[in-house]
Image (cartoon, rainbow, N blue to C red):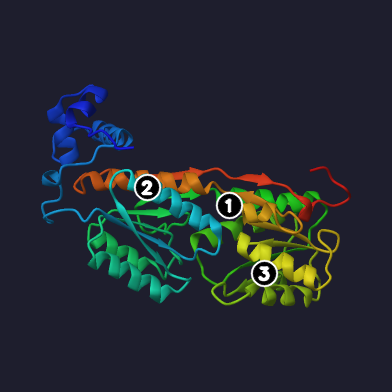
Amino acid sequence: MKRNKVTLNDIAREAGVSAMTVSRAIRGLPGVNKDIQKKITDLAVSMGYIPNRSLGDTTREQTSMTVGVVLPYLGNTIFSTILENIELVLSSYGYRTLLCCTFNNIIREFHDISALLERQVDGIIWAPLELNGSLSAAQIIQKQHCPLVFVDRTIPDCKTDAVLVDDFVGSLTLTRHLMDQGITKIAYVGPVQHSYVEEERRNGYLKAFEERGLSPRAEWMIKVKTETSHPEIEAISRILQCQDRPDGIFCFNDTLTIGSEMELLNRGIKIPDDMALVGFSGTSEMQIARIPITGVFQDGPQLGKTAAEFLLKRMINRKIRLQPEVRIIKTRLETRQSSLRNNAAL
């Protein structure tokens, strides 16, 4: 359905200020209280305001009406869900999205970011691969004064908007759940990349051990190259070779979790009797797996929509200097057959 054009007067009436104040706020001119400026910007986005290009950044003749979205891979459907909802919001404002999939390759990620900047996209939504390795690309984006929003992952040293889930608490809750089932020899399977999300999930896992006065053995900490074919085969092989064999597995994401279930079953390992299994993201594949898998659900639609809304606020006019905003979206535990022992109730 075609969106009715929202004017400065419409925003002014809603905000209870003059149209001149709205104009100055959207153009990033001095003389407007920061709280009022934020209120006006929030209203502009929620009402569907699209700025006149003549009000835009004077360093560029016109906007490209394109936004870059940079994601690590689409094999895990949480990212395709995020992308779908980014597109849903941005397209309603007339923006087209350019997708870059880095396939967990840090060099490719840098080249993708550079290519988007060369094409003069109006903004970038990005799930960075690494805490340190991705920092240089983030700094280039900011030097170009291109609006940037992190989604699902962040780089704490880079002060910009971010939409995240509570990975630490979600991981802590998931590990506590296993321990409540009497499963205390828990292996952790994660990616080689040192990303924000990997660090938070690993720290939540470790915190659960600390709470119980326990320590995971070094051999239970399994890191695999997720960009390779079937990394779960290597992970399960290493787990089954442990001198002190685990009785549970915590996988970093759904792709690793589902692959691990298939590999365990192929090897004749009973789930959960011989080996309990849990994962993170809670996509639909976890529920319809051969043995339904316990996981932490993260709200992909909300991640995508919020990231798009954050970016719209920045693209209204890049001269507006609002403080970076971080939105943390709560997770929830969904228990299923893969982790429930002794006929525990679902």
Residue displayed at 33% across by 73% down: 111
How many marks do you count on the picture?
Answer: 3
> Residues at badges 1 and 2 in contact (C-beta under 8 Å)?
no
Query: Residue under circle 2?
Result: 308
Per the model, the C-alpha gap separating discs 3 and 1 is: 17 Å
Classify residue 265 by image quadrant: bottom right
Residue in front for this viewpoint, 22 or 186: 22
Residue displayed at 74% across by 54% down: 292
Instruction: Identify the secondary structure beneath mark 3.
Output: strand
Instruction: Identify the secondary structure beneath mark 2.
Output: helix
Pinpoint residue 188: horizontal percent, then vertical percent.
Answer: 67, 65
> Residues at badges 3 and 1 in contact (C-beta under 8 Å)?
no
Pinpoint residue 155: horizontal percent, then vertical percent.
Answer: 42, 59
Residue in front for this viewpoint, 202 or 236: 236
Res. 95 in view: yes
- Mark 3 and mark 2 lie on one chain; the one further toward the N terminus is 3
Classify residue 286 by image quadrant: bottom right
Q: Is residue 67 above or below residue 112?
A: above
Query: Residue under circle 1?
Result: 168
- Mark 1 and mark 2 lie on one chain; the one further toward the N terminus is 1
Per the model, the C-alpha gap separating discs 1 and 2 is: 24 Å
Query: Residue under circle 3?
Result: 221
Disc 1 residue type? Phe
Disc 2 residue type? Ala
> Residues at badges 3 and 2 in contact (C-beta under 8 Å)?
no
Indicate the quadrant containing the C terminus: top left, top right, bottom left or bottom right.
top right
